[in-house]
Structures are given as C-alpha cells and as structure tokens.
Image: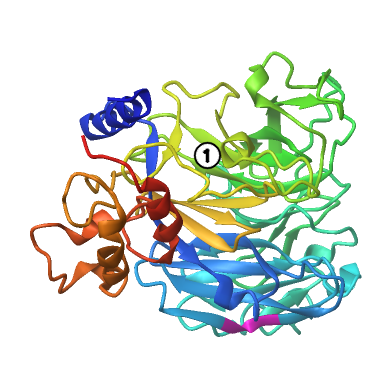
C-alpha cells in the first residue's frame, strides 16, 4: 500500500473512532452561481437559522449594480429565492457589510451604498416571508423596515452587525462598530432606535496604553459570546474585549500577532502568541465566527477566521488562509481540522485556490459550520459526522477506478440522492468523489483525478 493510501486509511479510521474530536466534515458544496448575478457579482456574507442560509452580495465591478440577499434551503438548495426587499442599487465595490439573525428576524447592513454615510442602512425582515418589518422604524419614525444612518453614525460602519446579548440582563441589542471611533453603537432590535451611539457606546478598542497598534479602530467583523464578550477583527488581527457591565469593558486580549509587509514579525499587542497565528497587514474582508465548546465538533472555544492579506493574489491555498485559534489565542489542542466527508484532507477540488475572502457562520442548532467562498460563489457546509463512501469512483465495484466506471458515473448524476439507483450491488454513494454526501457536477474533477486508483 502506498504512503498516500496509508494516510487516507488512517484518517478515515481516526474519523470513525472519534479520536479526532475537533474535526468537521464537508457534507455539501452549494453552487450559488445562478444568484450572483441578480444579488450582486459575488457572495460576501452568510448567516443561517439552521434550515436556511441567507447569503448577501457585493458589487465587485466598476459600475453601479443591484445587490441583495438570497435565502437557500440547506437540505434542498433548489429551494432558493432572492429576497425582493433586500435588493438595492449600489456604487462600485459596495456590499452588504453584515447580516444577523434573531428570533426569526434577519437584519442586513449596507455601508455607504451610494458613497455617503447618509445612505448607510439597516434592514429588518421576516426570515420566513422576506417582508420588511414596519415596526423597525428608527429614530425618525420613517424607516418602515429600513433605518438609514443607524445610530446617527457619521463614520462608515465597517464592523458588520452583531447580536449583543448584553450583560447581566441589560445592554443588549443590534451592534455596529463605527470606523475610527473604537466604540460599539447599539440599536433596539424591535424599533431600530438608538440605544447607544458612537459617542456614548462602550469603548471596545484597547486604549489602556499597555501596547500600541497602528490601526487601533480600523474595525472589520465582530461576534459576541454568551457572556457578552466581543470578538472582533482589528484590521487583520483578532482581539477580544472582555465585558464588565451593560455598557463597559473591563479589559482586552490580543489573540494574534502582526507581520510587516515583508513577512517579518511586527511588534504588536499579541506578541508571545504562536508564530502560526501571525497575520499579514490589514486589508478589507476580514471575517470570523465563534465555535463554542458546547459544539459536538470540539470541547474548546474556538475562533475561525480568514487571513486575507491581499485581494490581488487569487492563488492562496484554503488551508493557508483559513485559521483557527482558541479564545485565549493558542492553537487548538487537539488541532481543529476541516476535512472531506470521508475524513481525508480537503483538496483543491473542494476548496480551489482563492483570494482568501471567506465568511463563516456556526449554526448551534444543527452543529453546522458554513464557509462562504467569495471568488467561486460556493457555500461549503461542514458537519460533525463523517460522510463515508467506500472507494469513491469505483461504481462497478471492480476494485479499480477506471474507464469502465465512466458510464455509471454519468448515470449516477441522474439519480439525485440515489433513489431508484439500478445497481444495488454497487452503491450510488461511490459516485460521491468529493465527500459532500451528493453526486453532482462538483464530483467530476475528483472522479477524473481518481481514475487509476485501486481500492484497499
């Protein structure tokens, strides 16, 4: 047996035995091409209620165009619709900066879509019907489901949206981080009115003076834990602001280190963390998600994020871009791995090289991790249970993947889910060559790559 086959067999054995407790497995790879398009040139933000994913778009072109939010059924991707009330015309390079879900309500932020902070808006819609909520009216009572210039922000709101759970039962709402202010602004979840603005919201930037960073309040994405602590991207870095009250922060932890443009370490607040957690200089498109220890995937509180250091190189390897650390800034132990459905490492067939612009959302209700691929317009769905198909590609069960399997592979494409598969002695699931639990056109390249393989 070759070393490569031995490695694959060991990986599958570990997956089955449960020895690799901090792993998740690719269960689907949803193609979003048909919607981008109508919802923008590329998908850039994702959230989910466990049944549906809500995927928001960007205008990654030099001309004005519409963007919007698409609702996709995670178990039946054909059940998808562009939510009409999310469609808006935006200038070049503008996009949905943040999505949040709470009690069946979808909140969507667009920062300066017409080139001015006055056009910045937050929409509140029913996740079930897509209808705007008239009660979400804002401070001036004119919103009817769309609040312009939320919290009176006069700076761009580049920090996305978050559901702040508050502290001790108060101080919660819909959070925004304003560029250049270092504060959390807060909206009422029902009415869209201002609870705190960029002058009196709690200071989430580290202004202790204990360390100095060159990009103190250049905020990107943020997420809250159940205790009200705030995990945020400070440019391309990750930090946590530790909650001490409804509108106060008691301290900070800097979870990553910085690199200079030449790749050398830069003195920064996170020095002392593992070198593997050093990130490159700031650039747009930094995202993150919290995977709590209560997940079936891990017994560690984890942060998953993208080290997106440049938008000019489309050849960054997924495994070099997507990084995971604990909420203390350490590398996970055991390591947290994203794997193919059969427990073997992901390949470029499932995760092609990219700019490194991904968004993440962990769904606690279903233990699913969603990874949105901006460049290839794909939504990757990871679960906590391996999807095992013995000897993928060997559809005639001859023990070898060869040209005799081609006709049956093509035939397998015509049996979604395997219902009615006419060869019960050799399972339809062997056509699943990328380990996502489906047999579809995404399996063509990995099937071709397996021609010549033999089964253990």
26 vs 223, left or right, is left
Query: In the rendered structure, which segment of residues is drawn in magenta?
Result: 83-87
User: Where's residue 353, x and y in %?
Assistant: 62, 47
200, 325: nearer the viewer:
325
Question: In which quadrant will I find the C terminus?
Answer: top left
Q: Which residue is mark 1?
A: 227
312 vs 27, left or right, is right
Q: Residue 411: which quarter of the image?
A: bottom left
User: Where's residue 212, x and y in %?
Assistant: 87, 24
Instruction: Count neighbours of disc 1 (C-alpha within 10 A) and say few if under 14, some if 14 to 19, many if 20 or more.
Output: some
The residue located at (33%, 25%) in the rendering is 2
Q: Residue 134: which quarter of the image?
A: bottom right
371 vs 195, left or right, is left
Does any portion of residue 368 appear in the rendered image?
A: no
Residue that sits furthest to the front in the current view: 403
User: Where's residue 30, x and y in %?
Assistant: 46, 64
How would you classify the magenta stretch by its main secondary structure? Answer: strand
Question: In which quadrant will I find the N terminus?
Answer: top left
The residue located at (76%, 46%) in the rendering is 313
The residue located at (54%, 69%) in the rendering is 32
Does any portion of residue 11 appear in the rendered image?
A: yes
What secondary structure is found at the residue carrying circle 1? loop
Image vertical order of residue 119 relative to residue 281, above or below: below
Q: Is 412 within the magenta?
A: no
């Amino acid at each position: 047996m070759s070393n490569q086959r031995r490695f694959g067999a060991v990986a599958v054995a570990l997956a089955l035995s449960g020895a690799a407790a901090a792993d998740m497995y690719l269960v689907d790879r949803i193609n979003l091409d048909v919607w981008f398009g109508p919802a923008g040139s590329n998908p850039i933000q994702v959230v989910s209620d466990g049944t549906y994913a809500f995927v928001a778009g960007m205008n990654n072109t030099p001309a004005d165009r519409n963007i919007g939010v698409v609702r996709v059924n995670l178990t039946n991707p054909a059940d998808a619709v562009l939510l009409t009330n999310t469609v808006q015309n935006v200038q070049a390079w503008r996009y949905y900066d943040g999505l949040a879900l709470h009690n069946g309500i979808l909140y969507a932020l667009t920062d300066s879509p017409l080139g001015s902070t006055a056009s910045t808006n937050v929409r509140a819609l029913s996740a079930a019907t897509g209808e705007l909520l008239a009660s979400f009216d804002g401070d001036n009572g004119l919103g009817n489901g769309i609040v312009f210039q939320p919290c009176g922000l006069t700076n761009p709101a580049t920090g996305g949206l978050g559901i702040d759970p508050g502290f001790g039962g108060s101080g919660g709402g819909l959070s925004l981080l304003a560029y250049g202010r270092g504060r959390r602004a807060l909206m009422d979840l029902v009415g869209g009115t201002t609870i705190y603005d960029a002058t009196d919201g709690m200071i989430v930037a580290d202004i202790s003076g204990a360390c100095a960073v060159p990009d103190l309040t250049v905020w990107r994405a943020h997420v809250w834990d159940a205790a009200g602590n705030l995990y945020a991207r400070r440019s391309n870095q990750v930090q946590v602001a530790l909650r001490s009250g409804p509108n106060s922060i008691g301290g900070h932890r800097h979870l990553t280190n910085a690199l200079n443009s030449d790749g050398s370490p830069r003195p920064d607040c996170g020095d002392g963390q593992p070198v593997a957690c050093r990130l490159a200089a700031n650039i747009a498109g930094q995202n993150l998600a919290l995977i709590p220890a209560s997940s079936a995937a891990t017994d560690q509180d984890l942060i998953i994020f993208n080290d997106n250091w440049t938008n000019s190189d489309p050849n960054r390897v997924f495994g070099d871009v997507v990084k995971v650390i604990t909420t203390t800034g350490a590398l996970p132990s055991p390591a947290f791995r994203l794997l193919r459905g059969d427990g073997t490492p992901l390949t470029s067939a499932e995760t092609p090289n990219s700019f490194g612009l991904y968004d993440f959302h962990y769904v606690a209700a279903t233990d699913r991790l969603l990874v949105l691929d901006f460049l290839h317009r794909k939504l990757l769905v990871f679960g906590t249970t391996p999807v095992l198909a013995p000897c993928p590609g060997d559809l005639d069960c001859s023990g070898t993947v060869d040209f005799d399997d081609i006709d049956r592979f093509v035939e397998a494409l015509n049996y979604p889910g395997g219902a009615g598969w006419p060869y019960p002695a050799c399972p339809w699931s062997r056509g699943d060559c990328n380990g996502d639990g489906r047999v579809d056109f995404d399996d063509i390249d990995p099937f071709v790559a397996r021609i010549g393989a033999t089964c253990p």
